[in-house]
Amino acid sequence: MTSVVMIAGDGIGPEVMTATREIVRAAGARIDWIEAHAGLPAIERFNDPLPDETLNLIRKHRVAIKGPCTTPVGKGFRSINVRLRRELDLFASIRPVQTLPGIKVPYTDVDLIIVRENTEGLYAGMEHVVVPGVVESLRLVTRDAVERIVRYAFELARNQGRRKVTVVHKASVLPISDGMFLRIADAIADDYPFIEYQQQTIDHVSLDLAMDPTLYDVLVMENLFGDVLSDLCAGLVGGLGVVPGSNIGKRYALFEAVHGSAPDIAGKGIANPIALLRSAAMMLDHVGQRVPAARIEQSVRKTLLAAVGLTGDLGGNGNTRTITDELIRNL
Ligand code: NAI
């Protein structure tokens, strides 16, 4: 039995989390769910969207899964996700992007992994008004953070038998910061002669991904580039409703769907649980429960191919209940 901190979040979060837990249990996983709060329910209860109690539970149990949380705009609250990544030093955001059967997209053979630096860059929160009408936003890049994210990407490539690592950059306009990123990556790549290594600019990669995504395998990059490219890649395989995500640090790991709280459909029972379910499969893999993880991934493929009971975002006329029943039947 593994203890996992479970944050349902808000909006469609509780709906997709309930479905996910039901399917995870049916897949034979042995999880002791430890409930914690974040998002709108935590603001009501603790006047803080990310209470210390929640952070401490994650520190204690080390592994967490999280539903989406609304960030109220203009109310003085900082993004929960940015805070979680910083407080727990979850330095690597990993998003595997693979073509799924039954979803109509232009490409049939996408199989890549985005490795995004999760703690600095423009997300370091250093922005100020110099004089009225002139604002400065600082993009922080440190040697330690670059070293650990690039090494993480190469280790991941080695452990998963991947053929190539591409470092994504814009060194032509950011010669000092991205120049350092590239120099560090060059040195680390030398330790992995059996993995093909490539440097490519963010604009070039964007074009290639739209024209032929099979050119890439593992892509590693700084925070903002990763934020943008990972959503672009989600679009290559069917959108945010099907792509899982994880945030990994040295001590802790947090798994979450990449979509938001979808306030437009919250409470209607029509949300698609697949993105969170696949994040749960990544979590099961991470804690060594590989058999239920594989069963879930296979069931997702079978369910999409059969196209029975699918939710509206997948082109079906079912709802959260019908797709959950199908996902359980296909385990
Ligand atoms: P969103 O991802 O919530 O919604 C975008 C569109 O996709 C909407 O039409 C929504 O109905 C649809 N959609 C999203 N997930 C779906 C699912 N599982 N099944 C079916 N349809 C789905 O993005 P939006 O509207 O920009 O953000 C809403 C709130 O979520 C904001 O407060 C934002 O800050 C927050 N957010 C939270 C995230 C997190 O906690 N990880 C990530 C992204 C946004």
Image (spheres, rainbow, N blue to C red):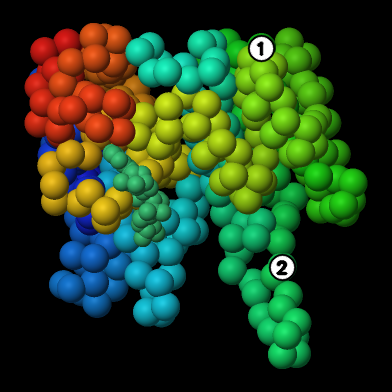
Q: Quadrant of the N terminus?
A: top left
* Crowd rating for badge 2 (residues with CA inside 10 Å; few <14, some 14–19, many 20+): some
Describe the element under mark 2 as helix, strand or loop.
Answer: loop
Q: Which mark is residue 325?
A: none
- Identify the residue shown where x is 35% and y is 13%: 102
* Crowd rating for badge 1 (residues with CA inside 10 Å; few <14, some 14–19, many 20+): some
Q: Quadrant of the C terminus?
A: top left
Which quadrant would residue 284 be assigned to in this image?
top left
Q: Which mark is residue 138?
A: 2
Amino acid found under the numbered disc labelled 1:
Arg
Residue 74 location, x and y as percent?
Answer: 42, 78
**Residue annotated with mark 1:** 163
Is 94 located above or below residue 54 in the figure?
above
Residue 240 location, x and y as percent?
Answer: 40, 37
Residue 61 visible in rendering: no
**From mark 2 to mark 1, how far is it between C-alphas?**
35 Å
Q: Residue furthest bottom?
A: 132
Which quadrant would residue 159 be assigned to in this image?
top right
- Identify the residue shown where x is 14% and y is 18%: 326
- Please tell me which of labels 2 and 1 falls first in the chain: 2
- Identify the residue shown where x is 67% and y is 80%: 128
Residue 276 location, x and y as percent?
Answer: 29, 35
* Image side of residue 227 versus residue 190, left or right: left
Amino acid found under the numbered disc labelled 2:
Leu
Describe the element under mark 1 as helix, strand or loop.
Answer: loop
Q: State yes or no: Cβ of the residue under disc 1 lies below 8 Å from any atom of ligand 1.
A: no
